[in-house]
């Protein structure tokens, strides 16, 4: 029983030492990647009336226009398919 009490008291001391350790204040310079990330975040947070999907300039604008163009091409092809399925390809050909 005496050994059990020693184990319990030593475990309490050990646990107390772990939980009450002093907090070290470490002053480190952020890495270059972190600085670049912060600069990128600041660029996107600026209120200049430009939507977030166009904030990077010309590459974003080209990508947006290509996506919009492909959307309209796909929409036109969808309507053409509906037309062909509704009236058939020979509709209007006289036969």
Image: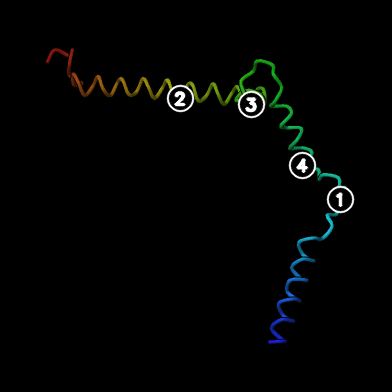
Q: Callout 1: helix, strand or loop? A: loop
The C terminus appears in which quarter of the rendering?
A: top left
Q: Which residue is mark 3?
A: 59
Q: Given this view, does label 1 or label 2 mark the residue nearer the observer?
A: 1
Q: Given this view, does label 4 or label 1 mark the residue nearer the observer?
A: 1
Q: Callout 3: helix, strand or loop? A: helix
Q: Earlier in the sequence, mark 4 or mark 2?
A: 4
- For this rendering, which residue is in front, 57 or 55? 55
Q: Callout 4: helix, strand or loop? A: helix
**Label 1 CA crowd tier, 10 Å (few <14, some 14–19, many 20+):** few
The N terminus appears in which quarter of the rendering?
A: bottom right
Marks 1/2 in contact by CB < 8 Å: the verdict is no
Q: Which residue is mark 1?
A: 25
Q: Earlier in the sequence, mark 1 or mark 2?
A: 1
Kindly give the residue lying farthest to the front in the view shown: 1
Q: Which label number is shown at residue 70?
A: 2
Image-based side of 71 in relation to 47, left or right: left
Image-based side of 69 in relation to 29, left or right: left
Marks 1/3 in contact by CB < 8 Å: the verdict is no
Q: Earlier in the sequence, mark 4 or mark 1?
A: 1
When asked about the image quadrant of residue 8, the answer is bottom right
How far apart in space, not on screen, are marks 1 and 3 (Cα)? 43 Å
């Amino acid at each position: 029983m005496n050994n059990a009490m020693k184990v319990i008291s030593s475990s309490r001391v050990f646990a107390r030492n772990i939980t009450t350790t002093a907090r070290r204040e470490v002053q480190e310079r952020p890495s270059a990647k972190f600085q670049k990330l912060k600069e990128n975040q600041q660029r996107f947070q600026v209120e200049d009336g430009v939507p977030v999907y166009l904030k990077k300039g010309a590459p974003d604008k080209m990508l947006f226009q290509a996506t919009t163009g492909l959307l309209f091409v796909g929409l036109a092809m969808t309507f053409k398919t509906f037309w062909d399925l509704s009236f058939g390809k020979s509709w209007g050909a006289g036969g």
